[in-house]
Structure formats: C-alpha cells, structure tokens
Amino acid sequence: MNWLNQQSSQDNDIQNNIIQSGKLPRHLAVIMDGNGRWAVERKFSRTAGHREGIESVRDIVKASSQLGIQYLTLYAFSIENWKRPVSEVSVLMKLLEHFLKAELNELHENKVRINTIGKISSLPQNVQKLLHDSIEKTKDNEGLTLTLALSYSGRWDIVRSVQMIALDIRRGKVSPEDISEDLFSSYLQTSKIPDPDLLIRTSGEMRLSNFLIWELAYSEIYITDKFWPEFRRTDLYESIMNYQKRERRFGKTSDQIAIENNNKESESYISRVVNAFKIK
Ligand code: FPP
C-alpha cells in the first residue's frame, strides 16, 4: 500500500502547510517513553503498553515518510533495558520480530531504508537474522532512513569508537594528531547519518537516557507529557511546528544568523535568475 495514496485530504493539507511554513528537520530522533505508565494508568499489563506503542511507531514512521523527512531514529531498546525482567525483555523482542515480519513489505514498497545502531550481536538470533534481511532488502531504497536503536547506548558507542581509533593508531593508520571531531564521528555507528535536528521525548522526562549523547550536541529538544502510545501524527505535527519557530544559532548571535539567511536568500534568487536565462 502506497502511503501517499492513503492519506485523507485534511491530513494532506496539514502536511502541505507544515512543509510550506518552514524547514523540516532532516533527522528526527525519538525517545519513545511511557509505554509502561500508559498501561499501568489503564490497569493493563506493561505488555499492552508496548503493543500500543507499536501503533504509534507505525503512525510516526508513515507520517514522517509522507512529510519527506529523510532520517528517523527510534530508541527502541537500550543496553540498560536488558536489566528489565526477563519476561518483559522477551515480549519486547517478540514485538520487534512481529513488527519486522508484518511491516517489512510495506516499508519496502514505500522506499523506507532500514538501518540499526547498537550491539546487534546481543539480540536473539532470529531477531538478528530478521534485521539483517530487512537491511539487505531495503538497502537501495531512497526514501526515509529508519534507524532502530537496539541494545544501544551512547556511551557504549563512544567507548567502542575510542577502542577502534586506538587500534588504528596501533596499526599506524591514524596518528593522535589526526583526531578531530569529524574523525571521531566517522567511527561512531551513526557516521552515515547527519546529527539529529530535532529530538522528541515523550512522557515528560527531561533527560537523554544515554541516547545519541554525542550526536545531540546541537539538536533542538521537544518534550511532551504524552505517553508514547498516545503520541500520534498530530503530536508529531505539533512538535515540528514548534521546531520551525526556533532559531538555531550553533553558538553564533541572532544578527549573524539573520545576515547568513539573507545571504542564502540572495544567492538562491541569483541562481534562480541565472537558471531562468540559461539556454537549454
Ligand atoms: C519505554 O517505555 C519504551 C521502551 C523501553 C520500548 C519501546 C518499544 C516499543 C515502542 C515497541 C518496539 C519498537 C519497535 C521499533 C518495533 P517504558 O516501558 O520505559 O515506559 P515507563 O517509563 O512508563 O515504564
């Protein structure tokens, strides 16, 4: 099913409004928190919370793809989550397996490229195989890159990168003087994706929980009180509209940013005029 043909005209209008009213985040990262509390508040089992959380995953993936967002990274399971009761971990692995089996064809049809970050070798064999096959099947897709952070933690990735740099120094491939932010980033598992522009965290908690701690250095953060199972496309739209009102200064002043934007506008105007007069 092609997601672009599936939209209501009202939803399509809202998305077009968002696209026209400012920049979309190129990379959206999400800490999907509050499945357990959502379930407990309703006297359901925590499993029911995770199950409903998958419905939110489906809706947010679809809406992000329809909007034309290029990268979506979901924090689905942290290294620290292994400390949860075995029964809950096993349900989460089963849900992940079910999600991949049920959604792969539709994700592929909609040009989604599946990617993972994290210590994938610690996941159950069947999940590893499914992930491997999903990545392989979708590797040439040019739509949304959906990165699932699984058995992931930011510090783990940083330590892993430091070890790899140390090994490359020992092999003579890198010298300590070469180490820069760019070189360090190139060793992270996220090296092929840009840093997130916007981080969304649900359930009102104000922390990063070891998610992309290097990559989020200059990201805009949006925190909502809604629990993840309640977070659907209209909440995504709200977060993006909020993002579009922000001024990203990257350490510069407001005046400098205004001058840069003016220069960019003039350059794009000049190139449009030049192109219009080019003989085809
Ligand atoms: C946090 O809620 C959520 C998780 C640890 C798991 C997130 C997983 C899913 C939404 C389903 C599987 C994902 C994919 C991509 C198929 P919590 O359990 O910590 O909630 P609480 O803080 O209220 O207890």
Image (cartoon, rainbow, N blue to C red):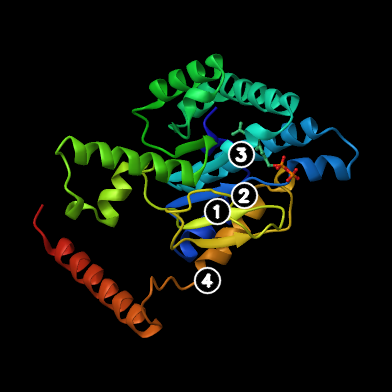
Circle 4: residue type: Lys
Instruction: Specify which label sits upstream in the sequence, 3 or 1.
Output: 1
The disc label shown at residue 15, or none: 1
Question: Where's residue 57, x and y in %?
Answer: 62, 38
Circle 1: residue type: Gln
Q: Is residue 78 visible?
A: no
- Tell me if label 1 and label 2 are in contact, CB under 8 Å: yes
- Tell me if label 3 and label 4 are in contact, CB under 8 Å: no
Find out if the beta carbon at label 3 lies less than 8 Å from the nearest ligand 1 atom: no
Instruction: Specify which label sits upstream in the sequence, 3 or 4.
Output: 3
Q: Which residue is mark 4?
A: 245
Label 3: element kind? helix
Q: Which residue is mark 3?
A: 80
User: In the image as oriented, which residue stretches furthest toward the front?
Assistant: 170
| Measured Cα–Cα span from mark 3 to mark 4 | 34 Å
Instruction: Specify which label sits upstream in the sequence, 4 or 1.
Output: 1
Q: Which residue is mark 2?
A: 11
Viewer-nearest of discs 3 and 1: 3
Question: Where's residue 215, x and y in %?
Answer: 42, 53
| Measured Cα–Cα span from mark 2 to mark 4 | 21 Å
Circle 2: residue type: Asp
Figure label count: 4
| Measured Cα–Cα span from mark 4 to mark 1 | 16 Å
Circle 3: residue type: Glu
Find out if the beta carbon at label 1 lies less than 8 Å from the nearest ligand 1 atom: no
Instruction: Locate the N terminus by quadrant.
Output: top right
- Tell me if label 3 and label 2 are in contact, CB under 8 Å: no
